[in-house]
Image (cartoon, rainbow, N blue to C red):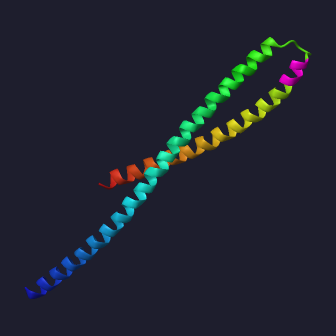
Amino acid sequence: MHHDHVLWNSDIEMWHQDVSIWKQELEALKNAMISIELTIENHEKSIDAHLMTIDEHRKRLAKHDLDLALISPGSRSDMELADSHEDERGRHSIQKEAHERLKKYHHQTMVHVKSLKKALDDAM
């Protein structure tokens, strides 16, 4: 019987050590979750800012379309509008690239967060 008690006490000591390590790991996990939450909040702010630039781009495009409709072909204003059109083309290209970068980042973020949540849910 004494031998069993020695083994059991050894198990209990090991369990205490495990729990102590788990608590340290959980503290590190809490800190990581705070960082993840801040990253997600920053991503949300980026999406909101991106939406604002999309809306501004739409307004500029609508103004550009209106200007095109009001200007006589071949006039000086028409030539200036042609330059403006090239500027608009450049802005649109930049907007398109920014949108694709944000879309890729968003999709990757969603996959990682959903995978983490699923893994934690499945573990229990």
Residue reaching furthest to the front:
76
Q: Quadrant of residue 20?
A: bottom left
> Residue drawn at (76%, 30%), measured in percent from left and top?
88
Secondary structure that dominates the magenta span: helix
Instruction: Name the side, left or right, on which 19 lies relative to 36.
Output: left
The residue positioned 75% from the left and 21% from the top of the image is: 64
Position of the C terminus by quadrant? bottom left
Q: Residue furthest bottom?
A: 2
Q: Is residue 3 left or right of residue 33?
A: left
Quadrant, the N terminus: bottom left
- Quadrant of res 61: top right
Choose between 62 and 17: the one closer to the eye: 62
Q: Which residues are magenta?
A: 76-81
- Magenta-drawn stretch contains 92: no
Give the side of residue 96 with respect to residue 1, left or right: right
Q: Is residue 98 above or below residue 60?
A: below
Q: Is residue 20 above or below residue 79?
A: below
Q: Position of residue 10 (x, y in %)?
A: 20, 82
Q: Is residue 39 above or below residue 46?
A: below
Question: Quadrant location of residue 21?
Answer: bottom left
User: Residue 76: image x %, image y %?
Assistant: 91, 19
Locate residue 9, reporting x and y percent: 16, 81
Identity of the residue drawn at 47% across and 46% down: 41
Q: How many marks?
A: 0
Residue 38: give x, y in percent of width and height: 46, 51
Say whether residue 91 is left or right of residue 107: right
